[in-house]
Amino acid sequence: GAGVSQTPSNKVTEKGKYVELRCDPISGHTALYWYRQSLGQGPEFLIYFQGTGAADDSGLPNDRFFAVRPEGSVSTLKIQRTERGDSAVYLCASSLTWPPKTDTQYFGPGTRLTVL
Amino acid sequence: RKEVEQDPGPFNVPEGATVAFNCTYSNSASQSFFWYRQDCRKEPKLLMSVYSSGNEDGRFTAQLNRASQYISLLIRDSKLSDSATYLCVVNRAGGSYIPTFGRGTSLIVHP
């Protein structure tokens, strides 16, 4: 079956611009996560959703970052007034159940964001 | 101190060698533990969960030491295809079970 998909795969933008990154989780997965991964580092948690609501957004670095999941499936990560430091690979993952104590997270291929 | 710490390596070993990685975590109330594998420019994929009693999957053995707050991964009979970055993941306790990743340990298996 289809895995987690993310679009675009690459995004190059200029400092100060607005970007949207999309994630399509595996069908039926209720939990969805966003991570950011910089070179040489592990994925850093940003936010997760249980259904439509953001269950924990404690990882969002500041108020320029926002994410939605209006129908409990597709999610969009939105970054306003992008900065060069936002350049990273943004990973989305989904899991079947909540809480994910022992549940497998399935990752998408990521969106590589470059802010010039 | 970071919540989850790993030696970034790289660990450079010949085919057939046995190699072990450790990962330490700071939150003693952490509930669940995993090893993920990440190939270059690819997404992480679950390698194995880590259970309190230790567990084995073929050439891979994972162990948890709650008293010392570390988990380990042992790879026996290394293959060229084992070359990757191995990420330790600890689910933060306290209701949210936020997955916290280590920075990963790079393994290079050479002929």
Image (spheres, rainbow, N blue to C red):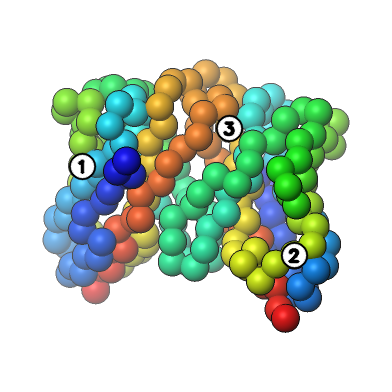
Kind of residue sitting beneath label 3? Asn
> Mark 2 highlights which residue?
B78
The circle drawn on residue B91 is: 3
Q: Which chain carries label 3?
A: B
Q: In which quarter of the image is residue A10?
A: bottom left
Looking at the picture, tell me which residue is in the foreground, A24 or B9: A24
Q: CA–CA distance between discs 2 and 3?
A: 28 Å
Amino acid identity at mark 1: Thr
Q: In this view, does B109 lie to the left or right of A111?
A: right
Please name the residue that numbered disc 1 is placed on: A76
Give the spatial CA distance, label 2 vs label 1: 40 Å
Q: Residues within 10 Å of mark 1 (few under 14, many from 20)?
A: many
Check the image and report above or below for B105 versus B28.
below
Quarter of the picture holding the C terminus of chain B = bottom right
With A75 as the anchor, is B71 left or right in this view? Answer: right
Foreground residue, B46 or A21? B46
Secondary element type, mark 2: loop
What element does badge 3 sit on?
A: strand
Residue found at x 69% / y 35%? B50
State which mark lies toward you, 2 or 3.
2
Q: Residue at x 58, y 32 (%)?
A: B91
Residue drawn at point x = 38 percent, y = 36 percent: A94
Q: Which of B107 and A15 is in front in this view?
A: B107
